[in-house]
Amino acid sequence: MEELIEQLKKQIIEVLNLEDVTPADIENDAPLFGEGLGLDSIDALELIVMMEKEYGIKLKNPAEGKEIFKSINVMAQYVNEHRTK
Amino acid sequence: MNIRGTIKITPQAVVRDGQTLPTTKHGDALLTECYRNSHADYPKYFKMDGLCRLGFVASELLLMAQAEERFQPRDDRAVVLASCHGCLETDQRYETTIDDNDNYFPSPAVFVYTLPNIVTGEIAIRNKYLGESSMYLFEETTSEEERLQLLQILTFEDPMTTSALIGWLNYLDGEHYLAKLYLITNE
């Protein structure tokens, strides 16, 4: 799981162009949206695309993202349970 | 028309009000160097496409040299720019995300920049300008004088507008771009 968490952090930084952020800056339990990394609705859509592209997870309802992208820990747990690649 | 300030950015140099600013990079890296030197603290810069980065940096460098209070909402200032390539570079980049049926992952973050007037909106949002915000596409062969004259006329058709950021903003790729912006007033 630790490996997946690190991988997700690197992918989020790359996909969302978080230029001044390092994996160490992203706390595993901190919220990704709002006060956390300050991500916005376009970032949420980009993460949905990333989930499908990298892990074969198709989120049919964008509202699901609200729960799944709560934190890196929650996201990693979801990826671990639902990934098809 | 009174010109209060000018800025010109090419992949090689930045000239503000006739003075070359000290820089060490070129191309896209020059824009990011200017962004960092401006201390703008606007992380959204890194999400922008090339055209928006160019417009953002040019407007920042131009406006920060002005003796005026910034970031106060105002409806008397317009942002009216012109380009010949518009957002073509981003359109092409977006197409690469959708042109393969077996690798079809349209990027929302790229898609939002597939309109050339996004850059004038970005500048207006950053500076809290509530006036006219437009991007015109001109023929490449239009002379600089003609462009400026046309933009000036279009800008001050709105009676609310007393000052404006106008000029040329063209981004073909990281090695081929030009920003020439003016801050003008209708005095």
Image (cartoon, rainbow, N blue to C red):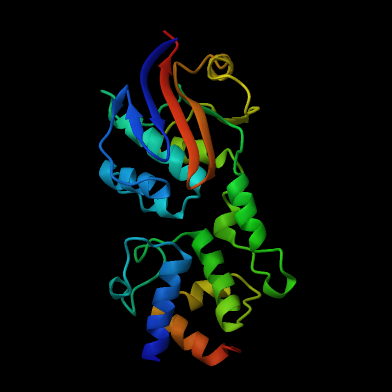
Which sits in the foreground, A10 or A43?
A10
The residue depicted at 33 percent of the width and 34 percent of the height is B61
In the visual, does B58 lie left or right of B147? Answer: left
Horizontal and vertical percent for residue B173? 53, 47
Mark count: 0
Of the 4 image quadrants, the one containing the C terminus of chain B is top left
Q: Residue furthest right?
A: B101
Residue B45 versus residue A31 in the image, above or below: above
> Does residue A70 appear in the picture of this structure?
no
> Does residue A24 appear in the picture of this structure?
yes
The residue depicted at 47 percent of the width and 74 percent of the height is A69
Q: Residue furthest top?
A: B187
Horizontal and vertical percent for residue B179? 46, 33
Q: Quadrant of residue B5?
A: top left
Which sits in the foreground, B174 or B43?
B174
Of the 4 image quadrants, the one containing the N terminus of chain B is top left
Horizontal and vertical percent for residue B53? 44, 44
Horizontal and vertical percent for residue B145? 54, 15
